[in-house]
Amino acid sequence: MTMPEQPDTALPEDQAAGLRRLAGARGFPPLPGRLHCIAIGSGKGGVGKTALCVNLSYCLARLNRRVLLLDADLGLANVDIQIGIEPTRTLQDVVFGHCSLEDAVVHIPNGPDILPSSSGTPEMADMGNARRQMLADDLLRFAANYDFLLIDTGAGIGKGVTTFLASAPEVLVVVANEPTSIMDAYSLIKVLCKERPAPRIRIVANMVRSLEEGERLAERLQGITQRFLGMDLPLAGAIPFDQSLRDAIRTRRPLINLAPGCAAIQCVEELARSLIAERRHAKVDTTTTTNLFNRLVDVAVKADGAPNP
Ligand SMILES: Nc1ncnc2c1ncn2[C@@H]1O[C@H](COP(=O)(O)OP(=O)(O)OP(=O)(O)O)[C@@H](O)[C@H]1O
Ligand SMILES: [Mg+2]
């Protein structure tokens, strides 16, 4: 992944205005009436967030949904590695005015569109609110072309990650059946559920040996959230440990091509179908989505993802 050129901190505000005109000229709908935004978090690292994001985006795309997959893990952005692409432009190039959103997006044939990221550049941290808002508006218009926006985030419960996740309308927390993953997932959920409004939070049990193990894991975590947070925590899906998934990542090939009938892809597809079914009834809150994109610009311009003071 290439680093953006040094930003011109004196970049005029009309860079964003230019993007806006471009978006308008290309006839993007004014607001995302249907966009379903889902961020993927975990607390503990290495539990399969990126793999879930990638495979879910392929499954949704194969079910004829338009999917934008955004890599917001600035510490270790690796969606491109798992997918096997080598992007030359990133979200930061868009923010710094080096290219348009359309130029940064990588189109995968029969798959999702990817908006890659690279590390933030502190010089841009003092970007004015007006410009940030304009960029956020542009992202909002651009995203309106899609049915789903999936956002991969970094591990940990640092303020940068939690602030961003908290601004998403919906968060899938990936959890593996091990005490550290469960406790870190709980710590993340605890922070998120204190937000007002709090995102809708569900869990995905990953690398389990059976659906029953996934359900037991969910019950265990639900027991904790109910007892200490008074909160229900539905299980959105369970994905088995599957060697094919490892082979897919190792060979940088989409799992859905490499092993279309494997257990993991079947379970991810089931999750994709349930998200599609829900989406028919979903009401998209434009305020929340606008807030999400404001945060995203914050994340893009600051290495730690913390909002501007
Ligand atoms: N269902 C699964 N079956 C087998 N291996 C899996 C499964 N899900 C993830 N993995 C493996 O776990 C490892 C970590 O996955 P991944 O990079 O997606 O995790 P992550 O949560 O995004 O990590 P990070 O916190 O570093 O971003 C990868 O090597 C991947 O192959
Ligand atoms: Mg990851």
Image (tube, rainbow, N blue to C red):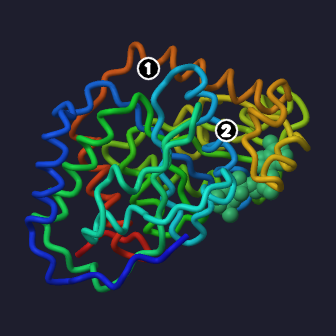
Left or right of residue 157: residue 81: right
Residue 294's spot in the image, x, y percent? 26, 56
Q: Considering the image in quadrants, where does the N terminus appear?
A: bottom right
Q: Is residue 103 above or below residue 158?
A: above
The amino acid at mark 2 is Asn
* Residue highlighted by disc 2: 55
**The residue tagged with tag 1: helix, strand or loop?**
helix
Mark 1 closeness class: few <14, some 14–19, many ≥20 residues within 10 Å: some
Q: Is residue 206 above or below residue 48?
A: above
Residue 32's spot in the image, x, y percent? 26, 32
> Does the image show residue 165?
yes
Residue 11's spot in the image, x, y percent? 15, 77
Tell us which disc is closer to us: 1 or 2: 2
Q: Is residue 76 above or below residue 162?
A: below
**The residue tagged with tag 2: helix, strand or loop?**
helix
Residue 279's spot in the image, x, y percent? 43, 20
Please tell me in which quadrant of the rendered image residue 61 appears: top right
70 or 153, which lies in front? 70
Left or right of residue 132: residue 98: right
Left or right of residue 227: residue 159: left
204 or 76, which lies in front? 76
The answer to whether mark 1 and mark 2 are in CB contact below 8 A is no
Mark 2 closeness class: few <14, some 14–19, many ≥20 residues within 10 Å: many
Q: Residue at x 49, y 66 (%)?
A: 88
Q: Residue at x 83, y 56 (%)?
A: 250
In the image, is the residue at mark 2 within 8 Å of ligand 1 by its beta carbon? no
The amino acid at mark 1 is Arg
User: Which one is earlier in the sequence, the residue at label 1 or at label 2?
Assistant: 2
Label number found at residue 184: none
> Does the image show residue 181?
no
Q: Considering the image in quadrants, where does the C terminus appear?
A: bottom left
* Residue highlighted by disc 1: 279
